[in-house]
Image: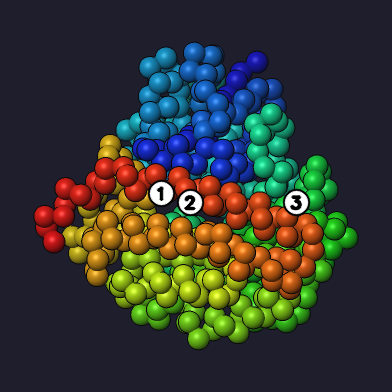
Amino acid sequence: MPRVFLIKPGLSGNRQDFYINTFRLEPLALAVLAAVMPAGWDVEFYDDALEAIPFDRTADWVGITVETYTAKRAYAIASEFRKRGVPVVLGGYHPTLLPEEAGEHADSVVIGEAENLIERICKDVLQNCLQKTYRSMKPAEWAGITPRREIFKGKGYLPVHPVEFGRGCKYRCDFCSINSFYQGAHRTRPVSDVVAEIRTLPGRNVLFVDDNFVNNGRSTRELLHAIIPLKIRWAGQATLDVARDDEMLKLLKASGCVGFLIGLESLNDENLAQIRKGTRTKQYNEALRKLRDAGIAVNGSFVFGYDGDNAESFDETLRFARKKKFFVAGFNHLMPYPGTALYGRLKSEGRLLYEKWWLEQNDYFGSVAFLPKNFTPDQLALGRFRVRRKFYSWASILGRMFDFKTHANSFDNLAFFLMTNLKNRRYRTLEEEAESLPSRQLALRKIY
């Protein structure tokens, strides 16, 4: 029986130690690929962050999904298999946006969505005629595909099951590689397929992994009505558009929605215009109030480092996040992902520290890959660390915990609030350790 290994690489550089055992979610994309393998193929899945990769075991080919943050490690894994004569195929966001780079480290590269190409790849492997590239010429066929979650058995993932309803996003934020990958398009699966998949899950906790769950209001409403009888608890990602429609908010709550990750990004309208976000800060207060009144918690996501940011931006954002009693919050620095408008702009302005920062040997967790306008790279990295540290302080956690409309409106929600914030607090401690690592920016201070 022919065999394929599907591999999720660990994070590249020194980041690995900071993520293991913190947040373990099933990598849904690989379960989808396993589901479309031709009959008769044996599929084995390995998560590099959790287990040793079996380089010396026999396989007919190896498929590795690659994100920018995992590229360096993915290429190292590919090298080990190729040394042993095993063909390696790389796919995912990073190879799609940089196929020539990926091709230097693989026997073949998938450009675009892989579902329509898997059968052909398997056939070509067996006939010893694997192509250098496989390009998806149309959106992947989605109907009738149920992810093979049995490949995750024994891996120790969190009991929260990722489910995909839609792909892509209608917005064109300049830092977002999702927009570059899908070219601004968006589509959804048949509602009946999503419902059938949820019915097979062993628990009630679901995470919709759509980049923007409310992209298509009509389809979203159809899905929400369909999952109400399933009595699940679920969360997802959305834009502030979700708060514009009172009927939608009621449906969300009735269907079991407990919260959304919402990319607010900045409290500066100059930054939002540069991002091309499509929202303005004047919308924040009312939208967040409506979500809270509906009993829907918010994971607010912020990005520091745009040209409108300065030293005051860190404390201003921290005060806002604590005042709004966000369930959790993400405080990130800007990262120029290849293929994005942001990357092109910073490159043209001569502000990239390294053209291929994801391959740098001295890359470390929390390092900054470009020259910010109003502070040094180190000031940006450490400012972000400081905000996160304060947001997950004991005083902040206790101050946000007793929100009886969201986090404390049930015992389950309160327990989940505490578990998630304590995990983030541990993650915060690991970031403190990162501050002692040699910064790749230290050598560049002489230029300021």
Secondary structure state at the residue bearing disc 1: helix
Please determine whether, in this image, residue 434 is positioned above or below residue 373. above
Please determine whether, in this image, residue 208 is positioned above or below residue 201. below
User: Would residue 16 be found to the left or right of residue 261 on screen?
Assistant: left
Q: Amino acid at mark 1?
A: Glu
Q: Amino acid at mark 3?
A: Asn
The quadrant of the image that shows the C terminus is bottom left
Label 3: which residue? 205
Label 2: which residue? 428
- 251 and 29: which one is in front? 251
- Name which of mark 3 and mark 1 comes first in the sequence: 3
User: Would residue 382 be found to the left or right of residue 179 on screen?
Assistant: left
- Whether the residues at callouts 2 and 1 have beta carbons within 8 Å, the answer is yes
Spatial CA distance of label 2 from label 1 is 6 Å
Please determine whether, in this image, residue 117 is positioned above or below residue 198. above
Q: Residue at x 47, y 62 (%)?
A: 390
User: Would residue 374 be found to the left or right of residue 259 on screen?
Assistant: left
Q: Residue at x 76, y 80 (%)?
A: 247
Give the x, y percent position of residue 312.
34, 74
Number of the label disc, if any, that sits on residue 432: 1
- 318 and 281: which one is in front? 318
Label 3, residues with CA under 10 Å away: few <14, some 14-19, many ≥20: some
Say whether residue 198 is visible. Answer: yes
Number of the label disc, if any, that sits on residue 373: none
Q: Residue at x 43, y 20 (%)?
A: 81
